[in-house]
Amino acid sequence: MPEAKKENLTEQIIDPRDLVAYQPGSIVSRMLAYTKSGTITVFAFDEGEGLSEHTAPYDAVLQVIDGEALVTIAGKEYPMKTGDLIIMPAEKPHAVHTVTRFKMMLTMIHA
């Protein structure tokens, strides 16, 4: 079976809000970059959706690109809105819950 062709977004001006669309009752994601150094993924969360508490082996940078969410890291809540950015440390439990429909860009930094 032939290898799937990867989308090439290099040298393009991109509005990340346009890369994923809201879908009722869903979380939609689109991976923009995947390398051994890390990943960049854009997510769209319908209102009422979220990611339950979990841990990751790498630091991650979450940037809100539309809407509002509540990010919890190690039990501490951080209200987030469009334009806000937070660094989530590796191995600390974290969760994401929508306040409104919400889009984020997540950059995972592989150490």
Image: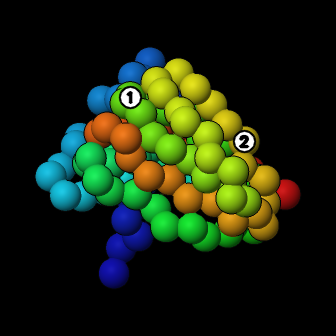
Q: Residue at x 24, y 58 (%)?
A: 26
Q: Position of residue 29 (x, y in %)?
A: 37, 53
Residue at x-position 57% and y-position 67% = 53
Upstream in sequence: badge 2 or badge 1 = 1
Q: Where is 90 relative to 31, above or below?
A: below
Q: Residue at x 26, y 47 (%)?
A: 47
Q: Which mark is residue 66?
A: 1
Taking the view exactly as shown, the residue that stands out farthest to the front is 76
Which numbered marker is on residue 95? none
The secondary element bearing badge 1 is classed as strand
Residue type, label 2: Ile
The answer to whether one can see residue 9 in this image is no
Q: Position of residue 81 (x, y in %)?
A: 48, 27
Q: CA distance from mark 2 to mark 1?
A: 18 Å
Along the viewing direction, whichever of 81 and 105 lies nearer the viewer: 81
10 Å crowding of disc 2: few (<14), some (14-19), many (20+) = some
**Position of the C terminus by quadrant:** bottom right
Helix, strand or loop at disc 2? strand
* Colour mode of the rendering: rainbow
Q: How many marks?
A: 2
10 Å crowding of disc 1: few (<14), some (14-19), many (20+):
many
Q: Nearer the viewer, residue 10 or 22?
A: 22
- Number of the label disc, if any, that sits on residue 87: 2
